[in-house]
Image (cartoon, rainbow, N blue to C red):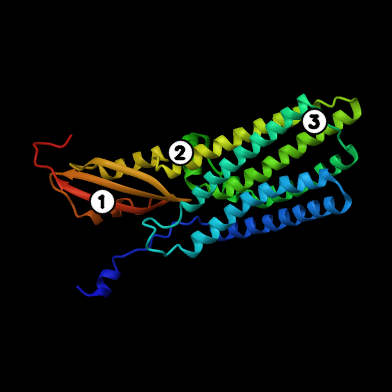
Amino acid sequence: MHAETIDAYRHEHVFLGADHSKNERKTWIVIAICGAMMIAEIGGGALFGSMALIADGLHMSTHAGALLIAALAYTYSRRHMHDARFAFGTGKLGDLAAFTSAIALAMIALLIGYESVSRLLHPVHIAFGEAIPIACVGLCVNLVSAWLLQDDHDHAHGHAHDHDDDHHDHDHHHHHRDLNLRAAYVHVLADAAVSVMAIIGLVTAWRLGWTFMDPAMGIAGACVIANWSWGLVRQAGAVLLDIAPDTDLAEEIRERLETGGDRISDLHLWRVGPGHMAAVISLVSHDPALPNAYKVRLANISGLSHVTVEVEICHGSHVA
């Protein structure tokens, strides 16, 4: 058999999300915005002797670092998408980055919680004239960043489906979700939430003299961030551990293949990238067709990007 003939049966293992390039650009833009804000705050704090500015700048740097992980994951997976060392492509690199970002987010929540409890037990002097404007500027930066990082696919699915398909849409939605972008979005949203709670706490402490409100809002913010972090850990961890992501898709595969005397003896279904699923299917039959015939039955299933079929002849009296 000629090499040209074999090439006709080969296929690439590129399982990047449909919006990979756009999401990569958006993430780098947000890093530039957060980086500029971070440099301005730390530089301004050093120049004018403001610890509040320096502290907020350092806080911003933690989120900028997490965003950098997301951006580098996008860039690396794009540049190495044809690398044969990755058996199923680089589509899951973003999920690994999302898991890493979720751990970083949990650490940020712990630090905020620890600092807030310390200030609740040992109150410190607050420079309201500096702290409130900084929190307001930080909130504006984070809202702009969150707007840039919102997932267009998530937004579109929010309005496009009938209620009869709610469960299928839920699975389909998570199957297509870019968790790397989601992690970056959660980071800036978490920072925005902290800014909102800081503003509430600072204004209340300033106007009413309730100094405990500032650290109390910090504790509340830490709890919100920890909850978001746990959600990301569960979603990204499920992808990294190849947990079957779509029960409805598995059922559809069974309905299409289990006709006549054909029966599925083994079915493995997992996500290999945003919007891309892989399946390994074992069939038994008294009168089996060629594997390609079964693949044709699955050809128009959206998101099913890599299918391997093996067929065994059943020598028993029947296939149940």
Can the viewer see residue 195?
A: yes
Task: Give, as a three-letter code, the residue at label 3.
Answer: Asp
Secondary structure state at the residue bearing disc 1: strand
**Mark 3 Cα-neighbour bin, 10 Å: few <14, some 14–19, many ≥20:** many
Q: Pointer 1: what residue? A: 309
Q: Nearer the viewer, residue 188 or 256?
A: 188
Sequence-wise, the earlier of marks 2 and 1 is: 2
Q: Nearer the viewer, residue 133 or 38?
A: 38
Task: Give, as a three-letter code, the residue at label 1.
Answer: Val
- Mark whose residue sits in front, 2 or 1: 1
Q: Give the image quarter of residue 242.
A: top left
Q: Quadrant of the C terminus?
A: top left
Residue 58's x, y, as percent? 73, 47
Name above or below for residue 61 compared with residue 231.
below
Secondary structure state at the residue bearing disc 2: helix
Name above or below for residue 285 compared with residue 40.
above
Instruction: Identify the residue at horizontal 42%, vertical 40% (top origin).
Output: 245
Residue 92's x, y, as percent? 46, 51
Q: Nearer the viewer, residue 272 or 86?
A: 86
Instruction: Identify the residue at horizontal 52%, vertical 35% (top origin).
Output: 163
**Mark 2 Cα-neighbour bin, 10 Å: few <14, some 14–19, many ≥20:** some
Q: Pointer 3: what residue? A: 214
Cα–Cα span, label 1 and label 3 = 60 Å
- Mark whose residue sits in front, 2 or 3: 3
Secondary structure state at the residue bearing disc 3: helix
Task: Give, as a three-letter code, the residue at label 2.
Answer: His
Q: Give the image quarter of residue 250.
A: top left
Q: How many marks?
A: 3
Residue 168: assigned label = 2
- Mark whose residue sits in front, 1 or 3: 3
